[in-house]
């Protein structure tokens, strides 16, 4: 590679970076994408069980976490799920809605990566893959990026887009590079922590024997609740409901779980009056998986027939089942986290363009920003929307 001037250099060949590069390239900008990975879109390929949950038709600003809950509103409004879906359909990619507005490829996530690369090709985007960034400098004429560990001639551009994500899933090559670069240029970073991640319960977990059992619940962390499935694991709790609340959970706080969300207050006492000779275990198994029902009956001291249990004991059991208190001792960490909460502070970025307020020409997009979506395609939609918004300003 010879020394060349670009209009923009995009650091990161993930969802946000590819989107930004493709749109900017098709707007006539000369763009270079740099990534230390040998291939583009590695995290896209493993998403959604290999089928890529590429957006969510229920996307709205209130489904994203940020120190500034209004920051994402502008980008999300200007590039919507319908816009990305139109692109998917233009490429003839078959898709389906799974649940709760989640859109998946019928085939493979490779189709989404291929689509984005073709969009980049149409924009004449250059790539430098398998090339780590050695350093970034900023001067009056723009940005100078050393790539390939110093073996290559540095490249320059008037604009630099940081799309290197957060530290979630380090085995895929994820790092905190975006945060280091932001700090280098005097920008603040909101403390990053694992999100959409299983929670651990510690050595005295009485539910460990139930690993593999799943049940529909309403899980709550603070004031935020989600109704989806919860899965017991050898280390604690997982499943969509737990992954969702994990983004809101703070160490030391409890997770409150309604284990019987379809049962109304008084259901056990009513059953006692209707079928006094019914066994408690059998009754609980009508609302819960058998292994979980048996374990809970034992923990709550519910043995024998309903007729032999006082209304007060049954009322206490109802309350316990509707608000079971788990106190996680931690999470599975960035290794198992799907995304990162926190990141480059939105206070230092324009919500319209994602450009730094402190360094003209520097943009931060995607997961690197302190904007984190719910489980279910929201984070991809933020990647598309933030990448598109930055590309309009390049």
Image (cartoon, rainbow, N blue to C red):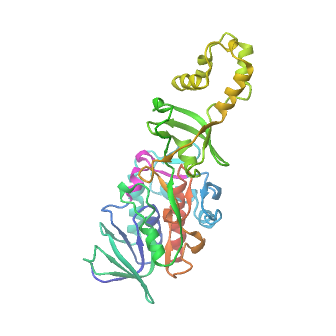
Q: How many marks?
A: 0
Q: State the quadrant of the N terminus.
A: bottom left
Residue 120 lies in what quarter of the image? bottom left
Q: Is residue 258 visible?
A: yes
Residue lying at the far front of the rendered structure = 204
**Up/down of 136 relative to 241, above or below:** below
**Up/down of 5 relative to 225, above or below:** below
Main structural element of the magenta stretch: helix, strand or loop? helix
Residue 97 lies in what quarter of the image? top right
Q: Nearer the viewer, residue 301 or 284?
A: 301
x, y (%) of residue 249? 58, 50
In the image, is residue 305 part of the stretch drawn in magenta? Answer: no
Q: Horizontal placement of 165 versus 322: left or right?
A: left
**Up/down of 201 relative to 210, above or below:** below
- Stretch of the chain drawn in magenta: 41-55
x, y (%) of residue 195? 51, 53
Residue lying at the far bottom of the rendered structure = 140
Residue lying at the far left of the rendered structure = 151
- Residue at horizontal 70%, vertical 22%? 313
x, y (%) of residue 134? 33, 75
x, y (%) of residue 312? 74, 23
Q: Nearer the viewer, residue 345 or 7?
A: 345
Residue lying at the far top of the rendered structure = 277
**Up/down of 293 relative to 120, above or below:** above
Q: Is residue 267 visible?
A: no
Q: Horizontal placement of 107 versus 301: left or right?
A: left
Q: Horizontal placement of 305 versus 362: left or right?
A: right
In the image, is residue 52 part of the stretch drawn in magenta? Answer: yes
């Amino acid at each position: 590679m010879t020394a060349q001037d670009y209009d923009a250099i995009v650091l990161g060949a993930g969802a946000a970076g590819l989107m930004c590069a493709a749109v900017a390239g098709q707007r006539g900008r000369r763009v270079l994408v740099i990534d230390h990975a040998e291939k583009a879109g590695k995290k896209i390929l493993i998403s959604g069980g290999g089928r890529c949950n590429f957006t969510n038709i229920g996307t709205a600003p209130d489904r994203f976490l940020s120190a500034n809950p209004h920051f994402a509103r502008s980008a999300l409004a200007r590039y919507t799920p319908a816009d990305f879906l139109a692109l998917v359909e233009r490429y003839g990619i078959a898709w389906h809605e799974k649940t709760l507005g989640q859109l998946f490829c019928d085939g493979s996530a490779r189709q989404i990566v291929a689509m984005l690369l073709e969009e980049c090709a149409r924009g004449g985007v250059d790539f430098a893959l398998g090339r780590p960034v050695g350093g970034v400098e900023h001067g009056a004429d723009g940005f100078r990026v050393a790539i390939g560990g110093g073996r290559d001639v540095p490249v320059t551009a008037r604009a630099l887009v940081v799309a290197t994500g957060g530290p979630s899933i380090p085995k895929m090559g994820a790092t905190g590079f975006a945060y280091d670069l932001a700090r280098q240029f005097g920008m603040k970073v909101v403390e990053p922590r694992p999100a959409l991640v299983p929670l651990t319960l510690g050595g005295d977990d009485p539910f460990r024997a139930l690993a593999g059992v799943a049940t529909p619940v309403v899980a709550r962390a603070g004031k935020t609740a989600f109704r989806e499935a919860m899965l017991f694991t050898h280390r604690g709790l997982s499943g969509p409901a737990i992954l969702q609340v994990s983004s809101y959970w703070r160490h030391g706080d409890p997770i409150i779980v309604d284990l019987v969300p379809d049962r109304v207050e008084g259901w056990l006492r009513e059953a006692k009056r209707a079928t006094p000779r019914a066994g408690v275990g059998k009754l609980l198994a009508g609302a819960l998986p058998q292994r979980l029902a048996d374990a809970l009956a034992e923990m709550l001291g519910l043995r024998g027939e309903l007729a032999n249990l006082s209304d007060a004991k049954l009322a206490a059991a109802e309350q316990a089942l509707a608000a079971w208190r788990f106190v996680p001792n931690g999470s599975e960490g960035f290794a198992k986290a799907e995304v990162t909460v926190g990141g480059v502070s939105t206070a230092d970025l324009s919500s319209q363009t994602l450009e730094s307020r402190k360094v003209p020409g520097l943009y931060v997009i995607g997961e690197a920003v302190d904007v984190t979506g719910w489980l279910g395609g929201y984070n991809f939609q933020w990647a598309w929307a933030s990448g598109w918004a930055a590309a309009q300003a390049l």
